[in-house]
Image (cartoon, grey):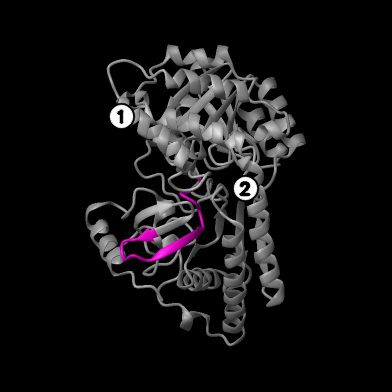
Amino acid sequence: MKVLHKGMNAYKNAKKVIPGGTQLLSKRPEMFLPDGWPVYYESAQGIELTDLDGNAFRDFSIGGVGSTVLGYADTDVDNAVKKIIKKGSMSTLNAPEEIELAQKLIEIHPWSEMARFCRSGGEAMAIAVRIARAYTGKTKVAFCGYHGWHDWYLSANISKSEALDGHLLPGLEPNGVPRQLEGLTYPFAYNDLDGLRKIVSEHKNDLAAIILEPSRSELPNKDFLNNVKDVASSSSAVLIFDEITSAFRINTGGIHLTVDIYPDIAVFAKALGNGYPISAVIGKREIMEAAQNSFISSTMWTERIGPAAAIAMIDKHKKQNISQKLISTGSSVKNIWKNAAEENSLEISIRGIDPLATLSFSGKSATALMTLFTQEMLDRGFLTGKSFYAMGSHTEKDICDYNLACKEVFKELASALHSNSIYKKIRGPLAHSGFKRLI
């Protein structure tokens, strides 16, 4: 058992001065191990983090929430950023790096012709929706998947509180979202073409955009994406691919490149800057130019660090074929889970593309088993949980050590399940499975 006094005390203080305790729901310790997660880090390098109490952990969990695709504090990316800092990260004039980054993204995605940059995924999606509405002169949006926290998206839960439950995070309340936005957004499920067609038939004359993540829990379904593209074209709606999570996992660029199906707009964030804030909206010229007929502008979108980091990340990602390493690492972790479960007769479910693998336990004790799994792996020096985001810095030794730890822990889980002692072994509350207000 690790000593976590400084981290837990810091989190208690944080909840007094920061609503929700953290800036990001995905980083709340309650999502992993309430009263037992290290919460804060002192340093991070490769896949290893050191917390405020001096404990070292290897990260086999969400890898900077998917942002550090190369690994923490990547030398090449950091060196590019340091050069920019020395030259000045902000000035009255514009950063030439944004031109180079735009050209790189367009070269990787030849169907696109123009790019706009901001600094986070949620705001990039808001920009994409604004552009689509400006271009079409229409207002309604059909969507599939998780697309951030902004009003346009969360408004789906105004009229039907569970509308977003199947799109990553259940239980999201639309408090603070104007009720006047009700009826502007309509969810459909992945592979549910009939559901999308129903939305289109009811709102065809006012449908500005069809938005979806081309992949999250599985590789892109080419037939489905082709059909969605046809529906978008027939309804004169802008087709937007949200590649915030999926990009730079199985190739250098958007995952839609693997099936040769191209949208009107694509959105990138997370991995693009390897931990530095940068996001991108790329698209066809005639659509992107509609941005000039609206007001889309922000001071910090013009800083220089984000574009410099993205350029360095893309160059290294391509040169070292990082995507193949991510696929191999993710596949290995999936096999570790599968084999450990089979050896101990535990029922589990494994989903996700290899670089973005997801583990879940079956049965009424599923949440308790996941909480205990996280607790016991933490004791062995691994940050882990229901999701694994592969990073380029995971080594064969790391994977081997993780395998040995998983074998030990899965054996303990099976023993606890059979002896009905799971809850006795957990040293705190169960992990949250969705959004919950913190007291």
Residue 406 vs 208, above or below: the answer is below
Q: Which residue is mark 1?
A: 86
> How far from the left and from the top, in percent, is residue 328?
67, 51
**Residue drawn at 66 percent across, 25 percent down:** 232
- Please provide percent x and percent y for residue 427: 41, 77
| Residue 199 higher or lower than 97, as above or below | below
In front of the other: 402 or 439: 402
Q: Give the residue type that dot 1 points to.
A: Lys
In 3D space, how far apart are the residues under numbered discs 2 and 1 (Cα atoms)?
A: 32 Å
Label 2 element class: helix
Q: Position of residue 101 (x, y in %)?
A: 50, 23
What amino acid is at disc 2?
Leu
Q: Which residues are magenta?
A: 50-66
For discs 2 and 1, the disc positioned in front in the rendered view: 1
Using the image as rendered, state which of residue 351 and residue 1 is in the foreground: 1
Q: How many marks?
A: 2
Look at the image and say whether residue 54 sits in the magenta stretch: yes
Q: Nearer the viewer, residue 436 or 262?
A: 262
Q: Is residue 99 left or right of residue 250?
A: left
Residue furthest to the bottom: 419
